[in-house]
Amino acid sequence: MELNEAIVKRINEICNEKKLNICDACLKGGMSPSAIYDLIKGRTKCSKVITVKRFCEGAEITLKEFFDREYFNDIEE
């Protein structure tokens, strides 16, 4: 799995677990949802840590909680 695929997978997991939609999480985190939607649609190939951090803030989780999945250890380059 590539990094962006893993990030998108985790975003979807968090939204499902917390019953959030991506737009609401992004807005609560102080960013435009377009950054996440571009990542999901494959328009962005290199996600920024600040984008993930702001999503986490909106979802009320830490970066550690976000990346606390085994599949992040098996990322292909």
Image: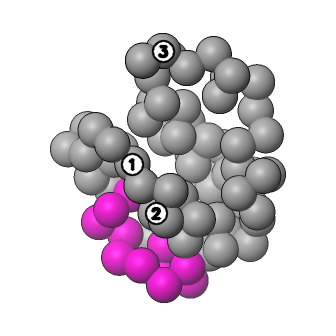
Residue 7, x across and y down, in percent: 53, 40
Residue 46 picture quarter: top left
Element at label 2: helix
Residue bearing mark 3: 76
The disc labelled 3 sits on which kind of residue? Glu
Residue 47 — which label? Answer: 1
Report the residue at 61% width, 41% height from top: 10
Secondary structure, magenta segment, majority class: helix
Left or right of 61 in this view: 36 = left
Mark 1–mark 3 Cα distance, whole angstroms, equals 15 Å
Report the residue at 48% width, 84% height from top: 30
Q: Which residues are magenta?
A: 24-36
Residue 73, x across and y down, in percent: 69, 22
| Colour scheme in use | one colour
> How dense is the environment of label 3, judged by Cα within 10 Å: few (below 14), some, or many (20 and up)?
few
Element at label 3: loop
Report the residue at 65% width, 74% height from top: 57
Left or right of 67 in this view: 53 = left
Q: Dots 2 and 3: beta carbons under 8 Å?
A: no
The disc labelled 2 sits on which kind of residue? Thr
Mark 2–mark 3 Cα distance, whole angstroms, equals 21 Å
Identify whether 29 is placed above or below 54. below
Q: Is residue 23 visible?
A: yes
The disc labelled 1 sits on which kind of residue? Ser
* N-terminal-most mark, 1 or 3: 1
Q: Dots 2 and 1: beta carbons under 8 Å?
A: yes
> How dense is the environment of label 1, judged by Cα within 10 Å: few (below 14), some, or many (20 and up)?
some
Residue 23, x across and y down, in percent: 44, 70
Left or right of 69 in this view: 32 = left
> How dense is the environment of label 2, judged by Cα within 10 Å: few (below 14), some, or many (20 and up)?
some
Residue 21 picture quarter: bottom right
Residue 51 — which label? Answer: 2
